[in-house]
Amino acid sequence: MAFSPRVFSGIQPSGDLHLGNYLGAIRRFVPLQDTHETIYCVVDMHAITVWQEPNDLRRATREVAAAFIAAGVDPKRSIVFNQSQVMQHAELAWVFNCVARIGWMNRMTQFKDKAGKNSENVSLGLLAYPSLMAADILLYKATAVPVGDDQKQHLELTRDIAAKFNNDYAASIAEQGLDPDFFPITEPLIAGPATRIMSLRDGTKKMSKSDPSDQSRISLLDDADAISKKIKKATTDPAELPVEVEDLKGRPEADNLVGIYAALSDKTKAEVLAEFGGQGWGKFKPALADLAVAQLAPMSGEMRRLIEDTTTIDGILRDGGERAAAIAEKTMNEVRRIVGFIR
Ligand code: TRP
């Protein structure tokens, strides 16, 4: 059986969405609605792998949902929901905890980075995080997952879990009369000139919500004035823009700003340099600021409006949750039979 093209992606509600989240993920969710069945999830259960104040978590969950909608995700065409509304995520994650090996989890670079020297004292959930992510994706038998390149390793682990489940339970899957490729081997969709947006202060560091400098990132809630000022003040080297893309090498700030321009205008870096190569920052930065304001300011306005309208947002999440649960329950029913759980 071929799996129908279905996209799943998730964003953590851990506060302060920025341009990196938008260009690396959310913006790419929109056109996929034309070619795939699309499911976009606010992964609140992932967020609590590190401490979240409950009221902040609620607000951040609504912020991510508002960003989806403001960016052009249509909650009628796509399924938009928060993970914790669909209990099957936790249920399948448990089964996957028993399929995956501890060694697989210990090898995850994101875990090592987040745990640091403190690996005995972080939550067990942080270690098991990729099992839950695999459950998110495989509950819907998603065939494609748009993510930033930092999630590549987690996607590979999802494929490993799918393959091991299909293999470990092959006899039972056959006995139940189900497709031997019960779970699909999901493809990552990692694309675009700017999947990694860097800090506006230091082109070698990723744009991050945890950077102490607010000038280092463009928040998706920034208004036109803030967006424009941050771009005009962004750190650059003194040289003018190169004509060739290769000459961006060794110039991380220039590379980043050209990448942002390219991503916001759906162009390649080469096309951007064909227009601006040989010119100075005094020309390029105002052009980038205008482009960013035109694209982002209406979105941030809409987001701020939606975040306050909790009735609408919560209604969208509840409706999405019901539609997601209908699909998830079908998969979970099969999984329970395969594993040998009596119901
Ligand atoms: N781990 C992802 C991140 O931090 C978020 C995530 C959770 C996700 N579940 C997912 C992404 C499923 C894609 C598919 O960015």
Image (spheres, helix red, strand yellow):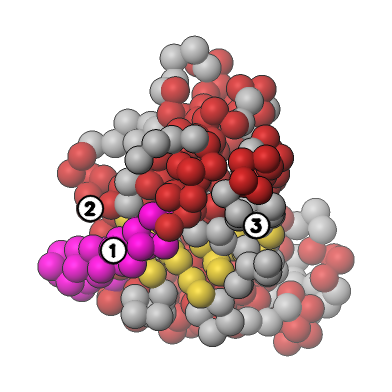
Query: Does 325 lie within the magenta span?
Result: yes
User: Mark 2 or mark 1: which comes first in sequence?
Assistant: 2
Name the quadrant of the N terminus: bottom right
Q: Is residue 252 left or right of residue 7?
A: right
- Type of amino acid under label 3: Asp
Residue occupying the point 52% across, 30% down: 97
Residue 94 figure quarter: top left
234 or 143: nearer the eye?
A: 143
Residue occupying the point 43% across, 57% down: 330
Residue occupying the point 86% across, 66% down: 246
Q: Is residue 317 above or below residue 53?
A: below
52 or 99: nearer the eye?
A: 99
- Type of amino acid under label 2: Arg
Labelled disc at residue 322: 1
Name the quadrant of the C terminus: top left
Q: Is residue 309 left or right of residue 185?
A: left
**Label tally:** 3
Question: What is the x, y in percent for residue 56?
Answer: 23, 45
Find the magenta span and give its range: 303-329
Q: Look at the numbered disc 1 and give the secondary structure of its residue.
A: helix
Pointer 3 local density, CA inside 10 Å: few below 14, some 14–19, many at least 20: few
Give the prevailing secondary structure in the magenta stretch: helix
Q: Identify residue for label 2.
A: 59
Question: What is the x, y in percent for residue 154?
Answer: 62, 43
- Type of amino acid under label 1: Glu
* Contact between labelled residues 3 and 1, with CB atoms less than 8 Å apart: no
